[in-house]
Image (cartoon, rainbow, N blue to C red):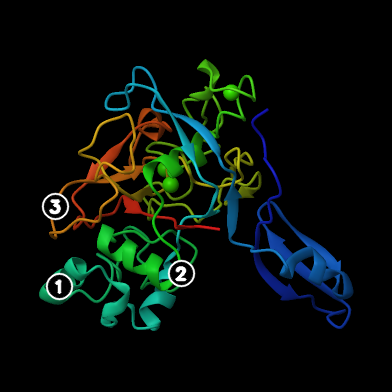
Amino acid sequence: MFRRYGIIALLILIAAAGATAQDRMLVHHHGGVDEYVVSEVDSITFAIDTTMVYIPSGLVRLGQEGVPGAEPENDFFVEGFWIDVLEVTNGNFQAFMDAGGYSTEEWWNPVGWDWIVEEGLTEPWNWYSNEFHGGGVPGNENFPVLGVSWWEADAYARWAGKRLPTEAEWEKTAKGGCEIWGDPDICDELDTPTWPFGEQITWQQANGLGSGDPYEGNGWTTPIGFYDGEIHMGFETLDSPSVYGLYDVAGNVSEWCSTDRLYDYPYDPNDGREDPPSAFDEGFRVLRGGSWHDYSDNLRCALRGSLCPSQRDQHRGFRCARND
Ligand SMILES: [Ca+2]
Ligand SMILES: [Ca+2]
Ligand SMILES: [Ca+2]
């Protein structure tokens, strides 16, 4: 019931194969490498946006009874949207930096721009340290970017032609809409799964604290899409997409959302909570999913973390959304 939903194309890297490069090519994706005859490849791969998945319109039951700050449960209609399959990586963020990300005002919220100019910021926090897989260290390209404030995540998203998801979008992405669980025609009591996989989570599915992955104490974050069913560095993983096919929704880095956390449920996008901050440390922007530094309780779908938008540390990253 809770496996992949819809069409998921997870094609990270396309490379020509060796000896028969004229005729065949390898398509790398999570869990394996498929070989295709080149003449077949266009229809298989290039026509598909390989990095985002479409979340269909529909109701989601937000919140969960017993989760502090996530009550009352409330049903909300989310318009269909696209969202990144994977957390934004150091490699992705390097491309933003290479494109003049920290010196191009047009991609920034004006308040965020004034703040980075005043602070003299030109890269994420701890970028050149390997303690938390900083992106400035060669070899760390496929680890999630962290040490980015809400302002930096917002600017990256704008540069990429995307935006940060709302917390309602993020939560539908994490737990699935009301069509996924229980009766597909209604929102019911089964539509509040605790974790993206249902009522259980194991440390073969997500990167939390004490999860035993090879990067515990050694950079801490796992490469994006690590939990793909393969054995990595001797560590056995389970292929663990969320119901719509995203990876690392629970754990690894917690993810900035557009929403102001100072507003309680029920969720209403028109009451001011989706207005961007108007001062550099105004309000608390929502963070979701928990990180490598959290136990499984903090990886729950409904849990609503938050920090002020200028916070930069080793736990926070993001993924992006866009409209149709
Ligand atoms: Ca249902
Ligand atoms: Ca861990
Ligand atoms: Ca995450």
Mark 3 residue type:
Glu
Residue at 54 percent of width and 54 percent of height: 82
In this picture, is 86 found above or below 102?
above
CB contact under 8 Å: marks 1 and 2 = no
Q: Quadrant of residue 44?
A: bottom right
CB contact under 8 Å: marks 2 and 3 = no
Find residue 52 and report its horizontal and vertical position in percent: 57, 58
* Number of other residues with Cα within 10 Å of mark 1, as a class: few under 14, some 14 to 19, many 20 or more: some
Using the image, tell me which numbered label, if any, was put on residue 114.
1
The secondary element bearing badge 1 is classed as helix
Find residue 299 and report its horizontal and vertical position in percent: 40, 34
Residue at 38 percent of width and 47 percent of height: 166
Find residue 198 and report its horizontal and vertical position in percent: 55, 26
In this picture, is 123 found above or below 77?
below
Is 177 situated left or right of 21 in this image? Answer: left
Mark found first going from the N terminus, 1 or 3: 1
* Number of other residues with Cα within 10 Å of mark 2, as a class: few under 14, some 14 to 19, many 20 or more: few
- The residue labelled by disc 2 is 161
